[in-house]
Image (cartoon, rainbow, N blue to C red):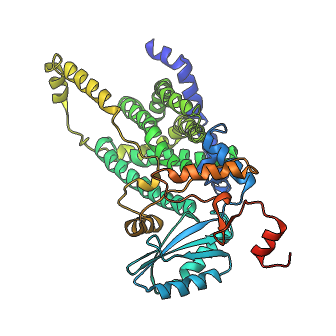
Amino acid sequence: MEEKEKKSGFWYQVANFIVNKRKAIEILFVCAIIYSVFCINKVQVNQDITSYLPGESETRRGLSLMEEQFVTYGSAKVMLSNVTYGQAEKLAGRMELLEGVKSAALGMDEEHYSGTNVLIEVTVDGSEEEEHSIQTMDAVKELLTGYDYYISTTIGETQESTESLNHDMNIILVLAVVIIIAVLMLSTKAYFEIPVLLITFGVAAILNMGTNYWLGEISSVTKSIAVVLQLALAIDYAIILCDRYMEEHETMESVEAVKVALSKAIPEISSSSLTTISGMVAMMFMQFKLGYDMGIVLVKAIILSLISVFFLMPGVILIFAKGIDRSHHKCHVPKISFVGKFAAATKYIIPPVFIIVLVGAFMMSSNCRYLYDVNSVESSKKTPSKIAREKIGEIFGSENQFVVMVPKGNYEAEAKVLAELGKLPYVSDVLGLANQTINDEYCLTDKLTPRQFAELTDLDV
């Protein structure tokens, strides 16, 4: 009687339909995989993280205004080591002759010349991410072949960082898969469960990467970490169904075991996924729109993982059913019943200790230091630009530049702002139209009479 009620239940009917129509479902998945594979390379990737800043934020308004009013040229600091000043001067002159180089400034002060190290400040005729600017920097590097040099620049840095991040995340993904396979070999009941789990996850990952095309564009950060996070968040769903199948298969044939296992797993896994989806949806309400970008991609990843587990995995299990039956092995996970015994024995000790630790952690959390500059983050693996920035900083010191925009036309007020900024103890140099002198006599913004202008330019009045 109880068995009949189970088989007449809603979820059993759903599972029965999925298993009976598994061949047609597998064909649909093959078509979806082919479509996704073709779409993966069409996904537009946004390398500019600043574009995700809230539109009303001060930084975003400033950047938008700069893009409208000014052309921001790319620049680079080139440090030459083990050269004389004369050699560096000649190289700076040759740099200025390169196509795309606006200037190659070299000074005699301590900020540009120290021992056998010389610092040349190069400005290119293009923005940081233009292909022309990147080619210009390649030409500068070719010119410096044979010299000891370090180049610190933001030209092409986003592309370099993205490539480095993608490379690192690919390594992490491979390591994660290797570790998961090793854990599954120890914890599963049959070795052929492993290909079932990997196929299910692999299909979900491909579908998610391909359907990113529907979103128009995604950030480079999201593209790099989405697969690893999808693996971390969704692999449990496939393991739950697989374990259910192994339990039911002890007393049932393969097909019936899959149906019963799926009917039990659908509500369990769906309920479990809701908490994860809720967390990802919460990210989508961040003011920093990168949270929305990551949130929507990961929500889609979880939903596609659920679809793969519920619709594809039953058929894959039945394909490998005979292999699963023949590859049973002993579970190598040790019993840890002592943990439960310890928890029961210390039930009056651990909770108070935990509360004390919690209060202490809360109080110490306010003392946590945060880094808002990626260049200040220490890492074991460094990009060439990062190494160059550190080397230049060791010899010539580090500096940060920022732009203050004021309404144009009121040069008297601009001069006052420049003077006040120059008085700040942490400001080493201030540059603006109202403080740039000509022949140490006039500023660029001074109003001149025709006679004064004639004398300045050595022209007839």
Q: Quadrant of the C terminus?
A: bottom right
Q: Which residue is drawn at 49% across and 14% down?
A: 5
Q: Give the quadrant of residue 104.
A: bottom right
Q: Residue furthest left?
A: 345
**Apparent side of residue 382 relative to residue 298 in the rendered image (left or right):** left
Q: Residue at x 15, y 20 (%)?
A: 346
Answer yes or no: is residue 32 visible. Answer: no
* Image x and y of residue 362, in percent: 32, 27
| Residue sitting at x 57%, y 79% | 140
Coordinates of residue 250 in the picture (x, y in percent): 35, 32
Q: Nearer the viewer, residue 373 or 411?
A: 411
Q: How many marks?
A: 0
Q: Which corner quadrant holds the N terminus?
A: top left
In the depicted structure, whether residue 345 falls above or below residue 383:
above
In depth, the one of 55 and 358 nearer the eye is 55
Front-lying residue, 306 or 221: 221
Q: Percent from the top left, x then y, of residue 401?
A: 54, 56
- 344 vs 325, left or right, is left
Residue 2: image quadrant is top left
Q: Residue 417: tell me if it is visible.
A: yes
* Residue 411: % across, % down: 71, 52
Quick one: 249 or 156, which is closer to the camera?
Answer: 156
Q: Is residue 440 above or below residue 72?
A: below
